Each structure stands twice: as structure tokens, then as C-alpha cells.
Image (spheres, rainbow, N blue to C red):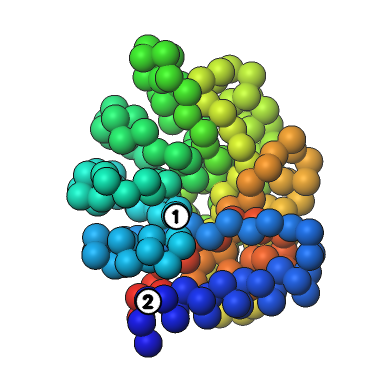
Amino acid sequence: MGLNQNLLEIIDKIEKARISTDRHRIINLVVASKYANTEQIAELYKCGQRAFGENKIQSLQEKSKDLEDIPLEWHFFGTLQSNKINALLRLKPYLIHSLHSYDIALELNKRLARDNLSLRALLQVNSANESSKSGVLAYEAKDIYHKIQETCSNIKLCGLMSIGAHSDDTNVVKRSFETTYKIYEQLDAKILSMGMSNDFELAIKCGSNCLRIGSVLFA
């Protein structure tokens, strides 16, 4: 099957999960383009897809440059290191999904303020409490979210991002999504970025309104 058919099938699954859960919710799809080359991204653009996300700043730099003639919406998913902040800001991403600590928020805000810039971001929550994942822990997420809002005026927090628990047990994954959703409900937030290729339907049922899907599109 071609990319167009793969995209249509993913959208169909998203719609079925959305309608069975909440007909009024709008769900945004961000294609995880680390699995794609520039030709495939351009093809998906022709199919109507606009938002793409990368985990590595160098990949985002290369692909956005190669595709600069196409009005794409670029997102950043990866763990942001302080020594990479300047490189990322030069790329002017639409949204950072992975603001993973208060300390990195302070560093990011300092660079933004220096250049009189602002940037949309999501606070990453490690709701499964897994050592392999970045993000703030669930019990501190609400306080850190408000702290960033109060002290980092150049960062425009829009919501939360979380990666589902690394488990074959659906109930464990579901609990990690539900934990993040409960935090999201307590915030003045618009975006809840949960769900990837292997669990996006479950994430929708748990309240997600933004999905990061890649590998199944390019299989």
C-alpha cells in the first residue's frame, strides 16, 4: 500500500476511536517523521498532512531546510539538552512536546528572553514513573506546570505530553494515560499529546487530543 492509503487508514482508526469516545473532540495528528525521508514527507503533504515532528534537532534542521518551500508545521519531540537550545530556536518550531524539567524551562526561557522570542511548549510527564523516560513525575507535574507559567513568561505552556507505559499489559498503559489525563483536567490547558503508533486508539479513549504517529505509516 502507498503512503496515501496508509494515512487514510490511520485517520479512519482515529475517527472511529474519537466518535466512540467524544464526538466533539478535535484530534490533531503529528506525523513522527524520523521514519521518513523528505520525499515521503512531501508526498504526505500532498495528501493533506501538515504537521510533522522530529526527535533530533539535526534531523529537524536538515529536513526543514530541504523542505523549506513547503509550508509545514514542525514539532519537536526529543529530550532537549541545554547546549542544543540555540540550535532549536533558530528552527522556530511550532511546538515543543518535551519540556521535561523546570531547570530546562529556565534555560529555555533565558535564551528566549534574550532574543525577545516566545515559544509554545508542552510539559512532559513521566506518568509511568519509568527510569528510561524523561519528564516530571505525576505527583509534581501540576506544581511545576504552574511554576513555569509564573516564572517563564517567554514559554507559552499549552498542555501536557506523555508516553504510555512500556508494557504489553493494556491496563498498565491505560493507567499511565489516565494518570496524565487527571493532571490535564486540573490545568488551564488545551493540548494533551498522548498516543503513538502502537497505542493511539487507547490514548484517544483516555482523553488525548494530539497523536504522534510514525512507524505504522511507513511500514
127 relative to 101, above or below: below
Residue 85 in sight: no
Instruction: Say which mark, if any, is on residue 3.
Output: 2
Residue 84 percent across, percent down from the top left = 28, 34
- When asked about the image quadrant of residue 148, the answer is top right
146 relative to 10, above or below: above
Q: Name the residue under label 1.
A: 50
Which amino acid type corresponds to the residue marked 1 in the rendered image?
A: Arg
Q: Residue at the bottom extreme?
A: 1
**In this rendering, would 138 be left or right of 64?**
right
**Disc 1, SS:** loop
| 109 and 144: which is toward the camera | 109
**Disc 2, SS:** helix
- When asked about the image quadrant of residue 137, the answer is top right
**In this rendering, would 11 be left or right of 17?**
left
Q: Which residue is drawn at 31% across and 35% down?
A: 91
140 relative to 195, above or below: above
